Image (cartoon, rainbow, N blue to C red):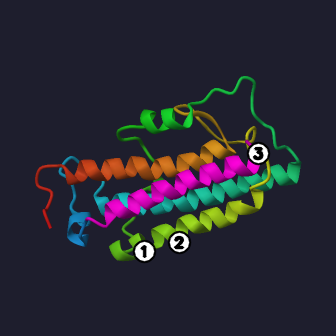
C-alpha cells in the first residue's frame, strides 16, 4: 500500500467508529446520559465529554509529533524491532476500564446535545488537520509509545483514535445495561 492508501484506510476506520458512536448515542435521552452508575463508572454524558477531550488531545499531540518530524527531518524514529499490537488486537486488547490522564477526565463542560452535535465536525477537523500528511510515509514515525499497546506509528495512532470511540461505546453500553438505568 502507498502512504496515501494507508492514510485513507486509517481515516476510514476512525470515521466508521465515529459514525457508530454517533448512532449509538442517538438512542439515549439527556436524562439517561446523565445517570450516574452506583459503581462509580462514568455516566454516558461523562464518557462523551472524555471522548471529546481525547479527540482534542489526540489532534494536538499528533500534530506536534508531525511538526517535530518536519522540523528535524526525522520521519523514522522506530526501534528495531517494533513491538506493538495490530489494529484488531488493539481493539480486542483494550477492554474494560483504564485510567485516563487527569486532563482528559470529564469536568462537566459541554451539553449533551452540543457535544453530540460536535462529534462529527470534530472528527472531520482531525481529518483535515492530518490531510496535508496523507502522502507522507508515517509507517516508521512513532507518535505514541504505550506500555500496554507498544510503539504506535502514525497510522496506528490514527486508528487508535477510532478504537477509543469504540471502547467508550462499549463502556457506555455497560452503563446502559446496569440495574437502575432509566428506561426513557
Query: Which image quadrant is residue 20 in?
Result: bottom left
Q: Earlier in the sequence, mark 3 or mark 1?
A: 3
Kindly identify which residue carries mark 1.
Answer: 117
- How would you rate the neighbour count of disc 2 (Cα within 10 Å): few for under 14, some for 14-19, many for 20 or more? few
Quarter of the image with the N terminus in it: top right
Residue pictured at 47% horizontal, 49% vertical: 164
Tag on residue 2?
A: 3
Q: Start and end of the magenta stretch?
A: 1-27
* Mark in the foreground, 3 or 2: 3
Q: Is residue 6 magenta?
A: yes
Residue 7 can be seen in this image: yes
| Disc 1 and disc 2 in contact, CB within 8 angstroms | yes
Given residues 44 and 120, the one toward you in this image is: 120
Cα distance in 3D space between marks 3 and 2: 27 Å
Residue 24: in magenta span:
yes
Dividing the picture into quarters, in which one does residue 137 lie? Answer: top right
Q: Secondary structure at mark 3?
A: loop
Amino acid at each position: 500500500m502507498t502512504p496515501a492508501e494507508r492514510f485513507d484506510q486509517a481515516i476510514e476506520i476512525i470515521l466508521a467508529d465515529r459514525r457508530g458512536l454517533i448512532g449509538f448515542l442517538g438512542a439515549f435521552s439527556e436524562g439517561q446520559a446523565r445517570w450516574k452508575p452506583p459503581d462509580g463508572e462514568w455516566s454516558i454524558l461523562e464518557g462523551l465529554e472524555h471522548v471529546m477531550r481525547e479527540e482534542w488531545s489526540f489532534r494536538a499531540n499528533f500534530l506536534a509529533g508531525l511538526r517535530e518530524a518536519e522540523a528535524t527531518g526525522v520521519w523514522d524514529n522506530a526501534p528495531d524491532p517494533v513491538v506493538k499490537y495490530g489494529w484488531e488486537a488493539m481493539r480486542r486488547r483494550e477492554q474494560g476500564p483504564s485510567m485516563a490522564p487527569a486532563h482528559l477526565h470529564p469536568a462537566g463542560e459541554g451539553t449533551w446535545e452540543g457535544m453530540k452535535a460536535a462529534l462529527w465536525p470534530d472528527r472531520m477537523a482531525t481529518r483535515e488537520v492530518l490531510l496535508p500528511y496523507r502522502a507522507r510515509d508515517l509507517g516508521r514515525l512513532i507518535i505514541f509509545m504505550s506500555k500496554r499497546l507498544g510503539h504506535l506509528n502514525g497510522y496506528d495512532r490514527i486508528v487508535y483514535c477510532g478504537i477509543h470511540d469504540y471502547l467508550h461505546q462499549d463502556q457506555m453500553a455497560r452503563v446502559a445495561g446496569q440495574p437502575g438505568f432509566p428506561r426513557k
